[in-house]
Image (cartoon, rainbow, N blue to C red):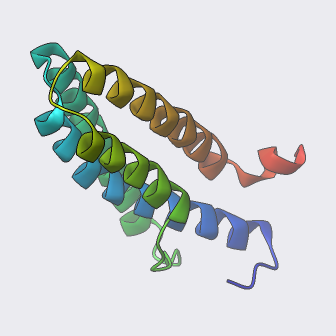
Amino acid sequence: MNMKSIEDVFIHLLSDTYSAEKQLTRGLAKLARAASSEKLSAAFNAHLEETQGQIERIDQIIEQESNLKIKRMKCVAMEGLIEEANEVVESTEKNEVRDAALIAAAQKVEHYENCQLRYSGHPGRAVGL
């Protein structure tokens, strides 16, 4: 994407965030099924509901701003984080070891997601505006 303005940066960040959240809905559903602890599975499902709400908010922003054209792209960072979580599932048995590794993977996702949401709301923050 050729970015020439803060608006272009905003659209890029929003598009990337939208992709990340969409990918995360699929990833969280898989993690909820993979967890051995009912409590952890419930936490993944709760996060899934929050993520679906974030997608709905982005959809509302796009609908309200008729000149806002979100770009079709894939968030490669989220793709990588989800792939790491999938590797945990594939390389562990369904027990407390897997759950511990899933928690670590989920924390990475959460940190990335927080960063995405912070800068998508105000891209000027990234450069001190």
Where is residue 58 drawn, in percent x and y? 40, 56
Which residue shows up at 25% across the image and 35% down it?
A: 92
Which residue shows up at 15% across the image and 22% down it?
A: 42
Q: Residue furthest right?
A: 128
Q: Which quadrant of the figure has residue 18?
A: bottom left
Instruction: Give the answer, above or below, for where 20 lies relative to 96.
Output: below
Q: Which quadrant of the figure has residue 33?
A: top left
Where is residue 121 drawn, in percent x and y? 61, 47
Q: Which of these two is toward me, 107 or 56?
A: 107
Q: Which of these two is toward me, 49 or 27?
A: 27
Relative to residue 59, is residue 69 drawn left or right?
A: right
Instruction: Give the answer, above or below, for where 121 lies relative to 19.
Output: above
How many circles with numbers are drawn on the protein? 0
Where is residue 101 drawn, in percent x and y? 37, 27
Q: Which of these two is toward me, 87 or 81?
A: 87
Relative to residue 69, is residue 59 drawn left or right?
A: left
Which residue shows up at 16% across the image and 36% down it?
A: 34
Which residue shows up at 65% across the image and 63% down it?
A: 10
Residue 28 seen in the current view = no
Q: Residue furthest bottom?
A: 2
Residue 46 seen in the current view = yes
Where is residue 75 drawn, in percent x and y? 50, 64
Instruction: Give the answer, above or below, for where 44 lies relative to 19.
Output: above
Q: Quadrant of the N terminus?
A: bottom right
Relative to residue 8, is residue 41 drawn left or right?
A: left
Instruction: Give the answer, above or below, for where 82 lies relative to 9.
Output: above
